[in-house]
Image (cartoon, rainbow, N blue to C red):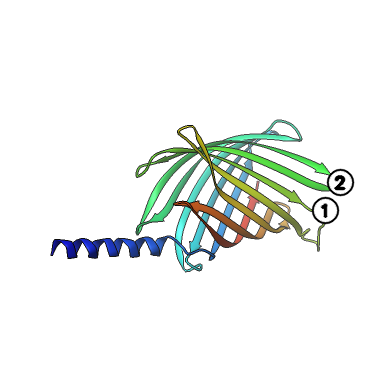
Amino acid sequence: MKKTYFLMIAFMLILALKVYAYNDGDFQLWNTDTQDFKVNKYLKAVFEEEFRWGGNAGEFYYHHYDAGLLYKLNKYWNVGGGYRHVYELSKRKFKLENEPYVSASVSLTKEAYTLDSRSRLEYRYFDYQADSWRYRNKFTVKFPLKFTKMEIQPYAADEIFVKLGNGIAQFNQNRVSCGFNINLSANFKAEIYYMLVSAKSSGMWKDTNVLGTKLKLSF
């Protein structure tokens, strides 16, 4: 009888894990809303909120709040830092991740192409698993094309994720994206993009197809 109960519990746990570990090739929807406020000529405060739906966009599984400061060193370099408060669905519960970070970015223009490279170092603090560090680098190319009065501009980007800990650096995620930046008004911008997320978990790589939108309000 005890063995039967054990097998039943194990089977239920396996089913739960399958429900919340989305299949390879899953389709997801992501939405990000951002507001930034100029403090002075060089400094601005940035606030962000993001929502994600997985399981072929049928299940809400991720939500974060982000608050930070961005300082303009010169026309090429920006540095910043902030804190991200993450809730992510795991085993039928939303679990918390605390994530302070620092960042640095450089922007150059070459033959009318805008090239951006942003590096970010995060400390990921959890209540339910070991803490870790993570390094991210996102490289973006904005093409010298603008369409309509809204100045719709295409771009392409690639972002790598490297987990750091115990003297080991592990490349475990890559995000390739392409999309359009849209100027809706002088201080209101939008973005729509497609992203292919390749992530490694338990020794296996899985791909996720993401259709994303971003709204940005500047003051």
| Label disc, if present, on residue 111 of the rendered structure | 2
Q: Amino acid at mark 1?
A: Pro
Q: Residue at 71% x, 34% y: name it.
A: 77
Q: Residue at 37% x, 60% y: name it.
A: 17
Asked if disc 1 and disc 2 are in contact, CB closer than 8 Å, the reply is yes
Sort mark 2 into few (<14), some (14-19) or many (20+) by Cα contacts within 10 Å: few
- Taking depth in this image into account, of 117 and 1 the one nearest to the observer is 1
Q: Amino acid at mark 2?
A: Glu
- Taking depth in this image into account, of 152 and 124 the one nearest to the observer is 124
Q: Say left or right for 186 vs 128.
A: right
Asked which secondary structure carries label 1, the reply is: loop
**In the rendered picture of this protein, how many numbered marks are placed on residues?**
2
Which label's residue is closer to the chain start, 1 or 2? 2
What x and y, as percent, mark residue 149?
80, 61
Asked which secondary structure carries label 2, the reply is: loop
Sort mark 1 into few (<14), some (14-19) or many (20+) by Cα contacts within 10 Å: few
- Taking depth in this image into account, of 117 and 172 the one nearest to the observer is 172
What x and y, as percent, mark residue 190?
67, 58
Quadrant location, the N terminus: bottom left
What x and y, as percent, mark residue 59?
45, 65
In the displayed structure, would residue 214 be above or below residue 81? below
Q: Residue at 75% x, 58% y: name it.
A: 154
**Pointer 1: what residue?**
144
Q: Residue at 58% x, 54% y: name it.
A: 33
Residue, far right? 111
| Label disc, if present, on residue 3 of the rendered structure | none
Q: Say left or right for 39 vs 61.
A: right
What x and y, as percent, mark residue 200?
51, 52
